[in-house]
Amino acid sequence: MNWTLALPELVLAIAGLCLLVAGVVPKRPMHFAITLGALGSFLLAAVLVMGQGEGVTFGGLYVADAFARFAKLLVLAGAGLGLILALDFNEKSGIARFEFPVLLVFATVGMMVMVSANDLMALYVGLELMSLSLYVVAAFDRDNERSSEAGLKYFVLGALASGLLLYGASLVYGFAGTTNFDRIADALSSPAGGSLGLVVGVVFVVAGLAFKVSAVPFHMWTPDVYEGAPTPVTAFFAAAPKVAAIALLTRVLAGPFGDLAAQWQQVILLISALSMILGAFAAIGQSNVKRLMAYSSIANVGYALMGLAVATDAGLRGLLLYMAVYIAMTLGSFSVLVAMRRDGRAVERIDDLAGLGRTDPVMAFWMAVFMFSMAGIPPLAGFFSKLYVFLPAVQAGYWALAVIGVLTSVVGAYYYLRIVKVMYFDAPAGAFDPRPAGLSVVLTVTGLFTMLFILFPAPLIAAAQAAITSILG
Amino acid sequence: MNAAGFPLLSLITFLPLAGVLVILSVRGEEAVVASNARWTALWTSLITFALSLILWFRFDRDTADFQFVEHLSWLPEFGVNYAMGVDGISVLFVLLSTLLTPLCILASWEAIGTRVREYMIAFLILETMMVGMFCALDFVLFYVFFEGVLIPMFLIIGVWGGARRVYAAFKFFLYTLLGSVLMLLAILLLWYRAGTTDILALMGTPIPPAIQTWVFLAFFASFAVKVPMWPVHTWLPDAHVEAPTAGSVILAGVLLKMGAYGFLRFSLPLLPDASAAFAPFIFALSVVAVVYTSLVALAQEDMKKLIAYSSVAHMGIVTIGIFTFNAQGLSGALFTMLAHGVVSGALFLCVGVLYDRVHSREIARYGGVAKIMPGYAVVFMLFSMASVGLPGLANFPGELLVIVGAWRANPWVALGGALGMILGAAYMLYLYRRVIFGRIGRDDLKVLLDLSPREYAIFAPLVLLTVWMGIHPQSFLSFFEASVAQLVARHEAALGAARLAGM
């Protein structure tokens, strides 16, 4: 057993435990120091991930490969940037407690286990570690009714999804006789493989994971939780866990259940199309910007899943690229939402952004970049990420899906443009409180990435290609 | 012939962005920033224009090949590269774009008083996108520029526009985007079939007629909206009316040409069979556009709206010319595009001159302007006559060639086009009479000042061009003769091959 393969997770888990102790023992508030410690451990984990070896360990439970590396770096980037967003916000909202960074560290460990899972058991353990931490942070503003409601709602529905997933996993175990991904693949490729029970099991697993990525029809929790949770928590939800869950879904479906592609493709196809349609249309009527972003994330997941639905090499590569760009755009636009604070109180109506182009031109500019990018307008990154999922769809002959995709992206453009309109065309509604430095960092980093992706797309594409090659072999 | 190794086209394309960086780096009082932004934008665009003049002198008019070609690896494993180059079809549009931009910046000198810095940045970015689009030799690159235009134009209409600017900006953006995304799918189809998006390579990859039909329809969705053709033209009057003067000039002068350019660059060479099959359809839409929008123009009460509808009519002539597939029709279409770019741009500037003084575009609001602003009346008359198609001015040679070409293809279409020209004379003269002649209806008109030196400076090059294009069209026609001849020859060869295959 080569436990050094899991070094990043181990280091991060131990760091989380140490941070917990460091938070409890001293008598003074440790929030700031613990947050810095958490950021440091994310950074350390990222370095370790980059130097990670490849192979399978822990009796086949855990796999480290290029795919895991790609997804983990995205997860860590999302978690780190999300934590930076929370730092100032929590202090101003009076919820600056050291448990917050610690919970995020544990959630991140869970996500990393998820993307490295090579067994249904490891999958479940990672997923639950992530979910349980996230239930708590959703309700972190505990004196706020909406936040508590969000946490509870998320927990109840999340538990239901976990149940579905477990049920599916047990069916798979029953019919394949194993929970190990490699052996499931063997069982499926044998002449007797692919029985109906296995198909049902896979559908349940997909349903459970679709809940985590908030794909239609398992999206109902998303708008409420996004709206109720504190904004930085929402930002975190929208970024890192989405990547982890999508990566997990990709690994499970393309790996062990690759031979059942003809079965699950139909499911993913439907989920993808429905997500794009609902995400586009339901966002139109929103007046709360966090709810709008919730529907936007549903639509984005729809586009990303298009790559999975196509189930080709190029499709999966497109999916990974999509998630990389998505995480940058999402964290960027959420950093603007986190900055929406007037006279010390967080505001979250779209109209509150009115006149941002005059009151804070820099932030408005970046927000416009993110909105145009999400609408898929070149030369921004969002255009290319869509391009790389549409191309495989066209290539594989999924015309209906591609046409739905481009048409819903036009509908989506309408509400993204609405934000640009409010910021630039409307009269100012008063300035926001000065934005903290950490937020500007996130804004600039993600903004530059979104804007300059066009100049250097090759390295990211190569990395995604390597990741896909490692799971498809 | 080619300045080998010197990336002239990239320089012309991206120089405006350097201006943007300079404008961004200026800090200080708002008035200082505004003044700096104006001057920087003006100088940047003038230098860009000066550089683009090199194209005029160094362009080899005897060949149909792409010239000033640049090639940079961008996404080699996908067959997508950064490729730039111009041929006879595109070179003059680069010049048109670089010429109109400084004029627009001058025209906005006093008219734009708020957020001058952002305005100038938007215009310079717009210039980059426009020039890049005409130079792109890679389909993905083309699409990037083609769509990228939407962002600055959306902001220009929405921030500095008139009362219904938000509606107009959204309509403009969503209409165009809807058409374009369908084209994107068609591009993806061609991309994976050919394994590359290099335009030259795509031209060498024949496409089966069954696929051509679909690809043509997808291209049509994008280009027809951009041209705009009847019945998808409705965004144009709104956008024109609400846009600031300079925005209208660019919209009419360059952006409308993108659609027609798309037909010429992509639909015709890549999809010869489908183009031939759809030609009657395009003719029908174009004739309807020419006649119908001319009639609509007659009934307009708003000067800008009237000229906007006249643009739709003129672009109808252009699409007729393109789908005649003969040398006269195509040359005429190209010439009309250029002439319309100059003349309709100038007409919008003329409206802008009045609007800056009176803040109304309502025709009934004016009358007797000739007595107060004689210089303006002369300039306006020149461009009105040019728009009507008076021989000796810019529009005449192009429209004549289109009618001749259309006569060869289908006399009824030629008749429809000619009818539109007659109606064109009616509405332009009607407009001119109501605004310029007659009694001075209102007292506030009596104090209007005639054109300022700045305004003369804006109109001078346009007047010069209008007369030059009318008197000596050959100096422009000679640019695209070789390319048009090659386009026609290839089209006939492709159709001939298809017919042989069918036998």
Image (spheres, coloured by chain):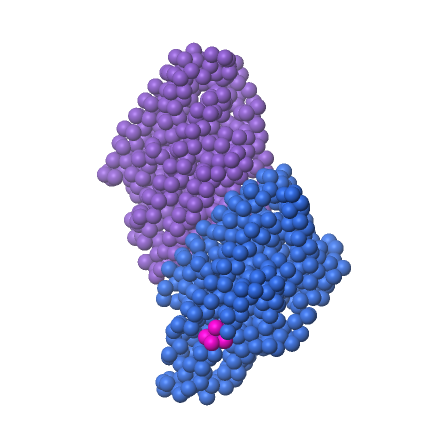
As drawn, is B466 to the left or to the right of B362? right
| Magenta-highlighted residues | B423-427
Give whichever of A302, B121 is nearer the camera. Answer: A302
As drawn, is B416 to the left or to the right of B9? left
Q: Is residue A430 above or below residue B418?
A: above
Q: Is residue B86 visible?
A: yes
In which quarter of the view is residue B296 placed?
Answer: bottom left
Question: Can you say which quadrant of the picture contains the C terminus of chain A?
Answer: top right
Residue at 39% x, 51% y: name it.
A414
Residue at the outermost front position:
B503
The chain painted purple is A
Q: Position of residue A89 (x, y in %)?
A: 35, 43
Residue at the outermost right position:
B1
Give whichever of B366, B496 is nearer the camera. Answer: B496
Residue at 50% x, 45% y: name it.
A383
Residue at 34% x, 48% y: name it.
A284
In which quarter of the view is residue B15 placed?
Answer: bottom right
Q: Position of residue B171 (x, y in %)?
A: 41, 57
Q: Is residue A139 visible?
A: no
Q: Is residue A453 above or below residue B407?
A: above
